[in-house]
Image (spheres, coloured by chain):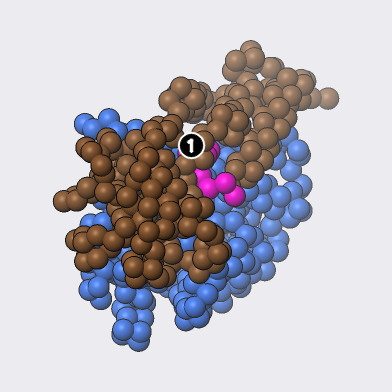
Chain colours: A brown, B blue
């Protein structure tokens, strides 16, 4: 009969360290799902996948912890120095991720990205003008580029202030297909009544569309009658 | 340094990482399931070892395993550990991120009016995978694969396929052995959890490094620079290849990203973006480093770049 292997002290058991590491990763995913930061980082379609992965990792972590306490073979495996290092680095990263939630500058991000060029031929057409979002307006203008068609239409949109080189800032939104890495801006020119608000400021604009001469010839601009400063919406990214 | 820019890089990093982690977990779970259901991986050794049929059979496995490139790395590692022919495992590694139902469906959804692209993307992915597998076959396995992977792989291979100098067991001077020693044992649940846990943790840390690199490069190199050469046939392909390396989004959604700038670039450049990203990008470099030694990694990058450039040029000759 084989003698029972000697069990190292709890902190040196490999299975317990593994369980702790998996729990840290689970914490990152579950915390991100719960605290709303996913709304800033990923398209909504991916949110359930992240939460599910967090739950699975938590389950795997609990299994490892249990094995490290009760399973004879698992409890006798001593953690290597490499695993200890992995634990330290992962712990440092997860603490940083928790302590420093993402706070991207949308204007900064949009400033380095090419404009989104997709036009959409769907329900945007049937929406009354005052119900069109900024994205609806941009896509509609791409499908129907004649500005005179829309002059005088009421506008009620929200977005952030995006500085433009050589022209006044626009009001913009970020479109995201997957995560922030693929974000592409869409924007509308605005004829600001006074000095334009600072970059990144979120605004709700009400007013009318007007035709003006711009860099690219005649173009549609928003003529605001009311400008309201608002906080960044909970779900600032658009599909 | 601009603090808004650093904050943006940090957010980009978190976005890339949190999006990729579930796919990495799926890959590790598939790999663990393969160890459990097919211990020893006998069926893997039945895959063809022919230089072209091998990669093709590996590529075809992608249809059964709908994960994007991060998830494919642990599965490809399991194929290699199980003793699959090198060509088949490499064919899977390089082609499966494109040849799977999710990626094909998303390409179709993004480009329903471009039937040539729906055909050219999977065909191009197979060509690149076969080309890379043929190229990497020229390097001996011992110089291509990482040492710990190679050691595990040799345990699964029949002794007759392992040279005398590389064997750690067996009888010198004995007759040629054709079967793997012993009947493979199904791993215990504790072993399965230990292996899967270690694999996930190691890959996750490499993914952190890759995402960090990708986020920093994306933040400090304006993307508009790369798209500025959109109309030039060769330059546009090179620029979009560079963009694919940098942007590091997963293959299941890269078609939607390509849609946003499709009108600004040549067709060859568009296809090059869709072919290169699933094979290699900044986020993947660390993960692939777990399978391949630096020499193999460099050959993969150079070979994939050259093949994709040639395919892109040919498409531009045809479509422009």
In what quadrant of the picture does the N terminus of chain B appear? top left
User: Circle 1 sits on which residue?
Assistant: A233
Q: Which residue sits furthest bottom?
A: B318
Front residue of this view, candidates B201 and A117: A117
Of the pair B272 and A182, the residue shown nearer to us? A182
| Disc 1 packing (10 Å; few <14; some 14–19; many ≥20) | few
Residue B52 image point, x, y percent: 51, 77
Q: Residue furthest right?
A: A1
Q: Residue at x 42, y 51 (%)?
A: A155
Chain on which label 1 sits: A
Tag 1's secondary structure?
A: loop
Q: Residue at x 31, y 58 (%)?
A: A210
User: Where on the picture, by quarter, is residue B314?
Assistant: bottom left
**Which residue range is magenta in the image?**
A38-45
Q: Position of residue A112 (x, y in %)?
A: 28, 49
Magenta segment, principal secondary structure? helix
The answer to if A93 sits in the magenta stretch is no
Q: Position of residue A31 (x, y in %)?
A: 58, 29
Identify which residue is drawn at 73% across, 20% down: A69
Q: Give B262 or B211, whichever is nearer the viewer.
A: B262
- Is A144 placed above or below A11 here? below
Q: Is residue B162 above or below residue B210?
A: below
Q: Quadrant of residue A4?
A: top right
Judged left or right of residue A154, residue A198 is left
Q: Where is residue B66 shown, x and y percent of the image? A: 62, 60
Quarter of the picture containing the C terminus of chain B is bottom left
Q: Is residue A39 magenta?
A: yes
Q: Seen in the image, is A136 located left or right of residue B298?
A: right
Examine the rendered structure and indicate whether residue A154 appears above or below residue B58.
Answer: above
């Amino acid at each position: 009969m084989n003698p029972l292997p000697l069990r190292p002290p709890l902190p040196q058991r490999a299975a317990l360290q593994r369980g702790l590491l998996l729990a840290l990763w689970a914490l990152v995913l579950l915390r991100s799902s719960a605290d709303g930061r996913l709304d800033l980082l990923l398209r909504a379609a991916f949110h359930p996948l992240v939460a599910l992965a967090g739950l699975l990792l938590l389950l795997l972590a609990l299994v490892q912890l249990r094995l490290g306490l009760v399973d004879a073979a698992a409890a006798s495996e001593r953690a290597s120095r490499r695993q200890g290092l992995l634990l330290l680095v992962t712990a440092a990263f997860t603490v940083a991720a928790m302590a420093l939630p993402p706070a991207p500058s949308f204007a900064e991000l949009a400033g380095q990205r090419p404009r989104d060029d997709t036009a959409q031929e769907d329900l945007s057409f049937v929406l009354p003008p005052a119900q069109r979002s900024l994205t609806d307006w941009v896509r509609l203008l791409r499908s129907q580029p004649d500005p005179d068609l829309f002059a005088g239409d009421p506008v009620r949109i929200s977005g952030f202030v995006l500085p433009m080189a050589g022209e006044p800032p626009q009001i913009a939104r970020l479109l995201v297909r997957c995560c922030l890495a693929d974000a592409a801006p869409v924007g509308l020119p605005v004829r600001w009544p006074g000095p334009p608000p600072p970059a990144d400021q979120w605004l709700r604009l009400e007013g009318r569309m007007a035709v003006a001469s711009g860099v690219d010839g005649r173009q549609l601009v928003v003529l605001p009658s009311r400008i309201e400063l608002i906080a960044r919406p909970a779900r600032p990214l658009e599909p | 340094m601009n603090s808004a820019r650093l904050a943006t890089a940090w957010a980009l990093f978190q976005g890339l990482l949190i999006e990729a982690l579930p796919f990495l977990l799926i890959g590790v779970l598939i790999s663990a399931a393969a160890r459990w259901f097919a211990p020893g991986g006998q069926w893997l050794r039945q895959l063809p070892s022919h230089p072209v049929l091998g990669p093709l059979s590996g590529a075809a496995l992608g249809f059964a395993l709908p994960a994007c490139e991060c998830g494919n790395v642990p599965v490809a590692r399991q194929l290699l550990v199980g003793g699959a022919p090198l060509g088949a495992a490499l064919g899977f590694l390089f082609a499966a991120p494109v040849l799977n139902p999710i990626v094909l469906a998303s390409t179709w959804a993004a480009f329903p009016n471009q039937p040539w692209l729906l055909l050219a993307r999977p065909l191009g992915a197979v060509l690149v995978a076969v080309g890379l597998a043929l190229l990497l076959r020229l390097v001996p396995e011992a110089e291509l694969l990482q040492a710990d992977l190679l050691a595990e792989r040799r345990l699964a291979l029949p002794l007759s396929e392992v040279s005398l100098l590389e064997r750690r067991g067996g009888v010198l001077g004995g007759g040629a052995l054709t079967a793997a020693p012993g009947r493979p044992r199904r791993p215990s649940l504790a072993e399965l959890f230990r292996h899967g846990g270690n694999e996930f943790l190691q890959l996750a840390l490499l993914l952190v490094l890759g995402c960090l690199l990708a986020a920093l490069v994306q933040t400090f190199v304006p993307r508009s620079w790369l798209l500025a050469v959109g109309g030039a046939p060769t330059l546009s392909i090179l620029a979009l290849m560079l963009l694919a390396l940098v942007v590091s989004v997963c293959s299941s959604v890269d078609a939607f990203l390509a849609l946003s700038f499709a009108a600004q670039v040549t067709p060859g450049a568009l296809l090059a973006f869709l072919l290169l990203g699933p094979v290699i990008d900044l986020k993947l470099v660390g993960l692939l480093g777990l399978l391949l030694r630096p020499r193999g990694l460099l050959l993969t990058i150079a070979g994939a770049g050259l093949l994709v450039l040639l395919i892109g040029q040919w498409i531009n000759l045809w479509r422009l």
